[in-house]
Image (cartoon, helix red, strand yellow):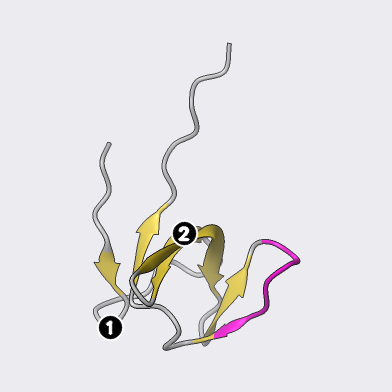
Amino acid sequence: MAHEWIDCNERKPPNLRPVLVVYSGRVQWIAYRWGGDKWEPTGDEYEDAPADAFAHWMPLPEPPPIG
């Protein structure tokens, strides 16, 4: 299933669900999750980001089949 980019000004993702985000026209390959008032990274090497940090988000793709 193909996903479309969703404008962050139109709606945010469900709370705490990891998603891909776009920052300054570039996709951030570390997934972030919306925490209700800020973006929270899913990895330790990044910091929280303010609510207006990202322009668009997209659900993560399904992982490939195993086996």
Is residue 6 shown above or below 36?
Answer: above
Q: Which residues are magenta?
A: 43-49
For residue 27, what is the image quadrant?
bottom left
Q: Please state which amino acid type lies under the numbered disc 2.
A: Val
Which residue in the structure is indicated by mark 1? 9
Which residue in the structure is indicated by mark 2? 19
| Nearer to the camera, 46 or 40 | 46
Q: Quadrant of the C terminus?
A: top right
Name which residue lies at 50% across and 70% down.
Answer: 15
Distance from Cα at disc 1 to Cα at disc 2 = 16 Å
Q: Main secondary structure of the magenta part?
A: loop
Q: Is residue 1 magenta?
A: no
Is residue 37 shown above or below 66?
Answer: below
Characterize the local packing of mark 1: few (<14), some (14-19) or many (20 or more) Cα atoms within 10 angstroms: few
In the rendered structure, the answer to whether residue 45 lies left or right of residue 28 reads: right
In the rendered structure, the answer to whether residue 39 lies left or right of residue 13 reads: right
Mark sitting earlier along the chain (1/2): 1
Q: Quadrant of the N terminus?
A: top left
Name which residue lies at 54% across and 84% down.
Answer: 38
Q: Residue 28, position in %: x, y?
A: 48, 63
Is residue 65 shown above or below 35?
Answer: above
Does the residue at mark 1 contact the one at mark 2 (Cβ under 8 Å)? no
Q: Residue 44, position in %: x, y?
A: 75, 66
| Nearer to the camera, 55 or 13 | 55
Q: Residue 36, position in %: x, y?
A: 51, 82
Q: Please tell me whether mark 2 sits on a helix, a strand or a loop.
A: strand
Name which residue lies at 69% across and 62% down.
Answer: 43
Q: Please state which amino acid type lies under the numbered disc 1.
A: Asn
